[in-house]
Amino acid sequence: MAKKDVKKIVLAYSGGLDTSIILKWLKNEYGCEVIAFSADLGQGDALAPIRDKALATGADKVYIDDLKEELVRDFVYPMFRANAIYEGHYLLGTSIARPLIAKRQMEIAAIEGADAVSHGATGKGNDQVRFELAYYHYNPAITVVAPWRDWKLNSRQALVNYAKKNGIPIPVTKKRPWSSDRNILHISFEGGILEDTWAEPPENMFVLTKSPEKAPNKPQFVEIEFRNGNAVAVDGEKMSPAQLLAHLNYIGGEHGIGRVDLLENRSVGMKSRGVYETPGGTILREAHSAVEQITMDREVMRIRDSLIPEYARQVYSGYWFSPEREMLQVLIDDSQKCVNGVARLKLYKGHCRTVGRKSETNSLFNLDFATFEKDQVFNQADATGFIKINSLRLRIRALMQANQKK
């Protein structure tokens, strides 16, 4: 669609440098109505000036929607039922929020009769894919305006110059030379001084967690209850999904839990450094795994675990609304019907460790069988045949190799 044919654009607006410039750029280049949409995903005080800032920058209308409960209930919890983790470290905090932002953005576009949507993702990053795959899921005919792939502002300095020319405040300063993205699951940092892969992140960068060295000298124990693979209570107190995660964020942050420094592989092929704080999510994943240990069948767990890298890749790469992710989710959710119980964790100076797990209804731990003491239900001599059958292929291979040496 030509610029002159675009009548109304809904912009995913964060209030940061990029989307502030994009808002003004859309007004200047397209000369049409621009609606700014910000999702309240747990950013805290960062949302306070959003409405006034967007209107001052040229927005014709502003939506700010509280999506915290929906994010945790319908996106984070399904992902955590899968124990998803990307490249062994990243709990997908930014990745899982993008499809929800895009979903609501498309709902607003429908409400407002907008014929285009826009975002602030760069042509080098993952978010452009995550946003746009979700847009097309909801409306295959929508026009997507991706300024970073269109404009000539190809450097941070060019953005700063454009901002100064158009009277846009610049939030990135020499004091905090990095960009960040925050929601109720995590906060991420990238760019700036973090592009030196040898340099340790400065302590003043972290927001959600205390330094493990300065965390309390006394450990804290926490008990988390699960029903069908979802956390429902902490220390016996029932909570909504968002309340529970926020509570764990506070507890984990006090003990320095959940810091990750990762050089990850982006969807477009390059490596990129990301530093993350995910205190509540780190606790939640450890607790979920602990309850699975006592309730999930061994072979079911083996198959489910083999799917974790693929599930995580799909989330990371923007395929939340794909048929393959939905297919995996059905299988994973079926495996979670038995994941009912309580995990007891010990938090201490950056470490989160399981120290107990129990299930009143679904425990597969049977002391009569597992005990090292005398029992009446297991004949240890049966293990001889079990070992011989399982070693058969190894013995045949050894005989073949011995014959080849003759």
Image: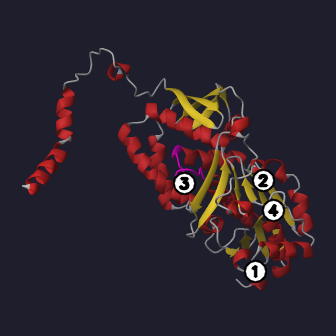
Nearest to viewer (mark 3 / mark 2): 3
From the viewer's side, name the closer residue of 82 and 133: 82
Q: Is residue 40 left or right of residue 91?
A: right
- Of residue 355 and residue 290, the one placed in the foreground of this image is 355
Q: Mark 3 sits on what residue?
A: 86
Picture quarter containing residue 406?
bottom left
Q: Residue at x 68, y 76 (%)?
A: 143
Dot 3 or dot 2: first in sequence order is: 2
Residue type at numbered disc 3:
Tyr
Residue 371 in sight in this render: yes
On residue 151, which mark appears? 1
Q: Position of residue 59 (x, y in %)?
A: 87, 68
> Magenta span has 85?
yes
Who comes first in sequence, dot 3 or dot 4?
A: 4
Which circle, 3 or 1, is nearer the viewer? Answer: 3
Residue occupied by mark 2: 65
Q: Is residue 243 visible?
A: no
Q: Nearer the viewer, mark 2 or mark 1?
A: 1
Q: Examine the structure image and report whether residue 19 is included in the region drawn in magenta.
A: no
Give the residue at mark 4: 16
Task: Work out whether mark 2 precedes mark 1 in sequence or the reverse, and give the earlier one.
Answer: 2
Choose mark 4 or mark 2, whichever is in front: 4
Q: CA distance from mark 2 to mark 1?
A: 29 Å
Secondary structure of the residue carrying tag 2 is strand
Q: Tell me the quadrant of the picture where the N terminus can be found.
A: bottom right
